[in-house]
Image (spheres, rainbow, N blue to C red):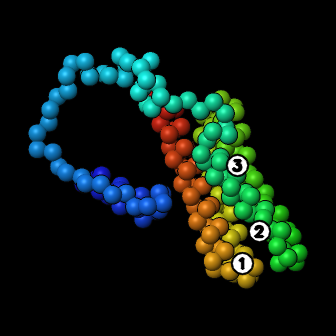
Amino acid sequence: LKALSIIKELNQEKVYDNPIVTQVNSFTKFYIAEKYHQNYYNNNKEEGYCKMVIQPKIEKFEDIVAWQEARVLTNMIYTFCRERVFTQDRDLARQLQRASVSTMSNIAEGFERGNPGDYARFLAIACGSCGEVRCQLYVLLDQKYISQSQFETLFSKVSQVNRLIQGLFNAVSRKRQS
């Protein structure tokens, strides 16, 4: 069942704090919905559920969860780069800071352009910046600038941000195609 594989993947990726617990059953008989439920969304776009759940509007980039988490990541990076170990390698610290700032900046800039094509392009750039941060974390670990525990904490956060941006990218890309 595809649903089970998706649940397994979400649990393995630790998208949520706790594992998804649900029961998935095969159906044996298909029941056609009542006539008033057919094409429900198109017939009820202004109703509460459709307006508030199906079609929520993000008014400003600060409302985007991916941007909020990228901001948390950037603050974690800046806090870490203030440590004494970076007095020896300021170039690496600055590059790490620029990559994390680039992540949140590209989410915001793409959103503000108001064009789904531009938005998708800037989200792809933000994903690339997340990759750059992850790569630099390996350099930090290999040079013994950070402990394994610090690496895992930062790596976990940047991976979460990357998943959020990728999900947003997929949603924007689907919207562009429809």
Q: In what element is the residue under mark 1? A: loop
Q: Give the residue type at disc 3.
A: Met
Q: In what element is the residue under mark 2? A: helix
Residue located 26% across and 22% down the image: 38
- How far apart, in angstroms, are the residues tagged by discs 3 and 2? 18 Å
Q: In what element is the residue under mark 3? A: helix
Which badge, 1 or 2, comes first in the chain's sequence? 2
Is residue 168 among what the camera can see?
A: yes
Q: Give the residue type at disc 2.
A: Phe
Residue under numbered circle 2: 80
Give the side of residue 84 with respect to residue 52, left or right.
right
Quadrant showing the N terminus: bottom left
Residue under numbered circle 3: 104
Q: Give the residue type at disc 1.
A: Ile
- Residue 141 quadrant: bottom right
How dense is the environment of label 1, judged by Cα within 10 Å: few (below 14), some, or many (20 and up)? some
- Residue 110 quadrant: top right
**Callouts 1 and 2 close, C-beta under 8 Å:** yes
Give the side of residue 2 with respect to residue 81, left or right.
left
Residue nearer the viewer, 64 or 178 = 64
Q: x%, y% of residue 22?
A: 30, 54
Q: x%, y% of residue 156?
A: 58, 65
Q: x%, y% of residue 132?
A: 68, 62
Residue under numbered circle 1: 146
